[in-house]
Amino acid sequence: MPQTAVAKASISKQIAEQLRSAIVTGQFKIGERLPTEDELAQRYGVSRSSVREALKRLAAQNLVRARRGSTGGNFVVQPSYEELAESLGAAATLLVGLGALGIDEIIGARRALQGGCLDQAITHATREHLANIEAALLRQQDPGISDEAFCRADVAFHRALVDATGNGMLRFVMYTVIEALIPVTNMVVSVVRERGDIISLHRQMLERLRKRDRDGLRASMDQLLDYLLLKFEQASAGRA
Amino acid sequence: MPQTAVAKASISKQIAEQLRSAIVTGQFKIGERLPTEDELAQRYGVSRSSVREALKRLAAQNLVRARRGSTGGNFVVQPSYEELAESLGAAATLLVGLGALGIDEIIGARRALQGGCLDQAITHATREHLANIEAALLRQQDPGISDEAFCRADVAFHRALVDATGNGMLRFVMYTVIEALIPVTNMVVSVVRERGDIISLHRQMLERLRKRDRDGLRASMDQLLDYLLLKFEQASAGRA
DNA sequence: ATTTTCTATTTGTAAGACAAATCATGTTAA
DNA sequence: TTAACATGATTTGTCTTACAAATAGAAAAT
């Protein structure tokens, strides 16, 4: 019983894997154009359709982007933290939607992870980092902005806070958690019509970060999370 | 100048987006079969090729999986932490390969995040969790296994440790960091021929987790990370 | 010199055909 | 009766060909 080669991945998957590894190993550099689809098809000895399906797989992972026209083609793109975190956050949101992940778990994760993160921020925050955080805070303080804009500024604030750690991996990971928390913030902001609590806590956090007040900063963040969880539960209860 | 609808996303992207939202909103439940490709093509008024490219996008995100045959089709799959973390870890590895992320940043992130994580584990670890951790440790202790198997067991150990927090989001996030650390462990294990250090630290961690020794557990993990970073730098230096 | 037009190139979309896998069903043989 | 086998229907996988749409650069016209 020859067991006929168990795993038979589809061609498009194989091609995608080969291209991916070619990109990762630097055979194709960032911004560079891949060979045309016809050429790839010829080179791998498959049809253009298969190459295209492979490229779509890579495009879905933000690894390549296509442009039409005579100077067009499929280009290797620099994956950004934002985009990556966005797709991760989408995945987390999906898990929530499917009931595989609870809001309390997301907040719990944020709570568990923030401590070390804030410590790093206190150690590494530069003047520029602080300015970015303040900018987000100022945008948030504008009473004229919409709920959506307020939430966007909220995300920007927390991202800037993580940026202050100066650690790319930390940014990558925490952006995901922040992204996953967006629905919570959205709900709280739209139901509780009081923005002042959030703003004042944010201001407090910025001040304490400036003063390098480690324990104070942690306490403020904890307070913020308590507030969010409480209001969210109230909102959920009120809806049911 | 009517500005003709700025953003013209490709059809396959639009279809992918529509299907995605249909899945997220629960129109298609998990495990369910989507309409056949022909039917989707007809329903959206596009060609089957376009539908297929859209499905490949979703497949790349582990949202659907295709099976051939008369009972086959494209099925909505339950995204697992493992798969998600794997693709995230791949993204992180990519960032490392492109020089956008340093090994020290990954280890730094691990160091910053583990504290709160271990606290959670100490609070929530059940007997079953501890058994899983021990199982991974036992596999790792077997002197007969290959380097690859050793590293797999290492990953299993750290995953089990995070599982003990009982928090899905934490698992999701930390799996990513663990995944991103695999290349480091690989290199250290293959260059430093001594597995005993890692094993004894792991054993120590399990013991301290059992004793609910918070500070001790943190210290062990810090020690392990110090060890990894040191050996990794030695190995890198030796290679250069 | 500037604007317009043309042209070549490349991805995007469509349509049709066949291969390969897979299951349900019926048929035959023991 | 039961088990093995053959057949057909269904669905995804792949290939082929053709044309549409976008785009940049060259050529032509003003």
Image (spheres, coloured by chain):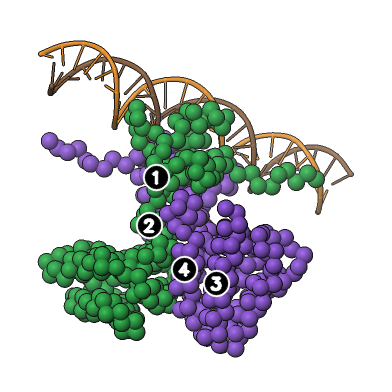
Chain colours: A green, B purple, C brown, D orange
Real-space Cα separation, disc 4 to disc 2, in angstroms: 17 Å
Foreground disc of the pair 3, 4: 3
Secondary structure at badge 3 equals helix
> Where on the picture, by quarter, is residue A163?
bottom left
Do discs 3 and 1 belong to a common subunit? Answer: no
Do discs 4 and 2 belong to a common subunit? Answer: no
Up-down relation of residue B45 to residue A111 (above or below) = above
Real-space Cα separation, disc 3 to disc 4, in angstroms: 10 Å
What amino acid is labelled 3 in the image? Asp
Real-space Cα separation, disc 3 to disc 2, in angstroms: 27 Å
Cβ atoms under marks 3 and 2 closer than 8 Å:
no
Cβ atoms under marks 1 and 2 closer than 8 Å:
no
Expressed as whole percent of the image width and height from the top left, the position of residue A166 reads 37, 65
Real-space Cα separation, disc 3 to disc 1, in angstroms: 34 Å
Up-down relation of residue B24 to residue A8 (above or below) = below
Cβ atoms under marks 3 and 1 closer than 8 Å:
no
Mark seen at residue B42: none
Q: Is residue B131 visible?
A: no
Up-down relation of residue B189 to residue B37 (above or below) = below
Secondary structure at badge 2 equals helix
Instruction: State the residue at coordinates (69%, 68%).
Output: B195
| Residue that mark 2 sits on | A81
Do discs 3 and 2 belong to a common subunit? Answer: no
Cβ atoms under marks 3 and 4 closer than 8 Å:
no
- First reached walking from the N terminus: tag 3 or tag 4: 4
Q: Residues within 10 Å of mark 1 (few under 14, many from 20)?
A: some
| Residue that mark 3 sits on | B226
Q: Residues within 10 Å of mark 3 (few under 14, many from 20)?
A: some
Secondary structure at badge 4 equals helix
| Residue that mark 4 sits on | B108
